[in-house]
Amino acid sequence: MTLPSAGLLPGLLLVADAVALVLLVPLVPVLAPLGVAGVWLESALRLPVLAVATWLLPSRRPSGATAAAVTVAATPAAFGTFRYLLGPPGAGPGLLAAAAPAWLGVTHAAAALALLAWAAPPTPGGVPETPGGVPKAPGSIRRALALTWEERKVLGAAFFFLMLAAIGETSGPYVTGKVLDAIRDGDGLTAGAIGMVAAAGAASVLFSGCRGALFMLLKARLHQSLSLQLFSHLVHQDLDFFQGVPAAELLAQFSMEVPRVCMAIPNGANQLFRSLVMALVVGTSMVGLAPGLALLALLELPLEIATNRIQTARKQSLQQSMMEASARTASGVQESVAAIETIRIFSAEEEEEKQHSWNLAKELRLKEWIELELAFFTLVHRVLHLAIRVLVLFRSHQLLRDGYITPGVLVTFLLYQDRVGSHVQVLLYGFNQFLTNAAAGQKIWEYLDRKPTGDVRGTREPPELQGHVTFQKVSFTYPGNPEHPVLKDVSFDVRSGEVTALVGHNGSGKSTAVALLERLRDPGSGRVLLDGIPLPEYEHQYLHRKVVLVEQDPVLFSGTIRENIALGLEHCKESELREAATAAGAMDFIQGLEQGWDTEVGEHGGRLAAGERRCVALARALLRRPAVLILDEALDDGDEGAAQRWLRTGLAQTVLVVSHRPRVLDAADRLVVLERGAVVETGTPAELRERCGAYSRLLLGEDRTGGPEAPSMRSEKGAASGRE
Ligand SMILES: Nc1ncnc2c1ncn2[C@@H]1O[C@H](COP(=O)(O)OP(=O)(O)OP(=O)(O)O)[C@@H](O)[C@H]1O
């Protein structure tokens, strides 16, 4: 049976050390009289044996092997030196070769603890896997610090009051002690003494208040700054990014992670810095009172640090998993609510319930696991604390008995031990919390580092546009499906002042062509030109004012009808609003509403009918007097007369319509027929009908291309052909 690899190195070092000590026994009479120097010489002689032993490991030599050998060799020498310097008079450093064999075990255990305290936290095993692994807190901390640096004035002021508050806090007991001394010396209570105590107390309260308020202010400002940065960054991302990341996950960043990152530095600075100063001051006082006892009491520190590091690594990993699980649950709820009609139609309620309950069960398992680990580590911390306290009491009993310390010193020491303990706890837990909160920002920094691929450096803003669109050998493939080219070498013109219809089977690439014209995506090869100029050369906002899109199911924002139509245009006149609404056929229904223009449309325009939403969206588009108006299946259902009117409102120069409706297609000046991403026919509707080619086949519903049939075409084909 082979030893587990984790136990191989310590086992090997123990055996090698035992061998080295046996070899060193003859040198004990020479080394012992040298005192501290002899102890260190013994360590230096053991080291080569230990170092050579690490090379005997059968497989790869672990990276920390040298550090382990040095620590094992130096631990007894360091202990002997402290014992000699700080221990009871007469206590010698002691050679390991001359000590009882049990000390060898103690030495190795101490070295292992020291290594554990400073080693990198192990990757948690046995916990649910996280795709991102353990968050890289250091990078996140650096970023969080850089963010905080932007608010350095507030941070500086907060630190200033933190220092004053710390002085006030420590001067309180000092002043009280002085007053007590004065009373003991028979000076009695004077107004000056009371004033000193009151002033120290008042200063402590006042400065603590200022410190707290400034750190709160810092948190609020960081929150605002990071939220804004993240939002501005996200709205510029490519569409593919939003398709790949669930909306709930992005929402969770704003509602949970941004506040956590923003509290990391202010809370960390506030708690950690204060506790660090206090722990150092009180710790030094303890060493001054009883050095040996202090060493024993402070042994709790490395043990707590080691336990804490393991706990932190596990907690970070679990919290990352928890965050992902919560985002999944929230995303599931969001999707179900959004698709409630589809769920009802397909009676998929039970399936959705099952999925939701599965998500919740996963979250619950993670929560249970987190709580279980918390309980376990709390127990470990308490046991450690208790064990050290018992050791200190045991040792202090010996020191008292031998007369090295007085009962008063012991009482003061124990009070100090409690105080330093509470500050160390704050340091450790605060540091833990600090790391966890800072690590929460990992996703946020990832998003902030993400650069959108689209080129938005265009500057052209010509005063006039003809609205002539040219697709020049355009090819396009969606990044999510690189094997399947959607547009292949597509070339066609949308002439200025005309209505051009894009026609083709479902999936033939019509909406993709529209997305390229709207610059929602950029072509893989080829160019899209507007008035002979490639689209990327136009200024981003200008282009989107001049080329506007109305979809079949347009998105409205919560707000009034007026706000939705005037969206993004700050100074538009009432007459222009009315003109656009009239041209879009929206006036009648707006005037029929109780609140008229000020009617709230509800979330996503849910309080309006689909047709009314389209009218509002068209009015919004026409208000911009577009050079190119794109109607992507916006005319495919609803009133036939309105559909015909929308094609020629007179407020848009050029119209590109995507439709499956034969009457709409017949009303166009020119048709471009797409089949599987390639242009197969162009011409007027009459020309194409005469040609009896792809367009005629589409109208007849003959699916020779293998693509799915267009249902709306089939429903109207009788009427359409009847007109011929
Ligand atoms: N985001 C996307 N990622 C990957 N493939 C996509 C994406 N959007 C569309 N496609 C694919 O691109 C092809 C063309 O889609 P497109 O929506 O342009 O067709 P269409 O002619 O407008 O269809 P319809 O008439 O149904 O609207 C389809 O095969 C579709 O599956």
Image (cartoon, rainbow, N blue to C red):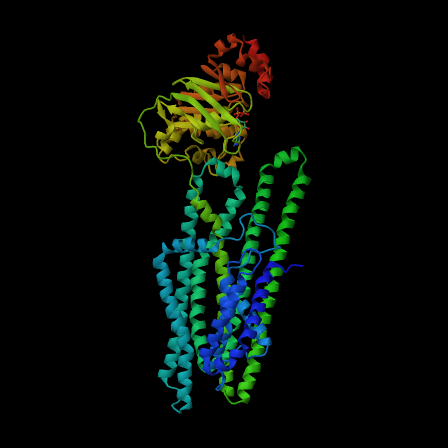
Depth check: give the residue in front, 260 or 680: 680
The answer to whether residue 229 is left or right of residue 349 is left
**Residue beneath the point at 35% across and 25% down:** 533
Picture quarter containing residue 276? bottom left
Q: Position of residue 17 (x, y in %)?
A: 55, 70
Q: Residue at x 37, y 70 (%)?
A: 164
From the viewer's side, name the closer residue of 158 and 209.
158
Q: Please name whichever residue, 20 or 427, is drawn nearer the observer in this view of the structure.
A: 20
Q: Quadrant of residue 10?
A: bottom right
Q: Position of residue 317 (x, y in %)?
A: 55, 54
- The image position of residue 597, as x and y in percent, is 45, 33
Q: Please, is residue 133 above or below residue 470 in the view?
A: below
Give the left or right position of residue 566, taking residue 50 as reference. Answer: left
The quadrant of the picture occupied by the N terminus is bottom right
Q: Is residue 526 left or right of residue 510?
A: left
Q: For the view shown, which residue lies furthest in the left direction?
A: 463
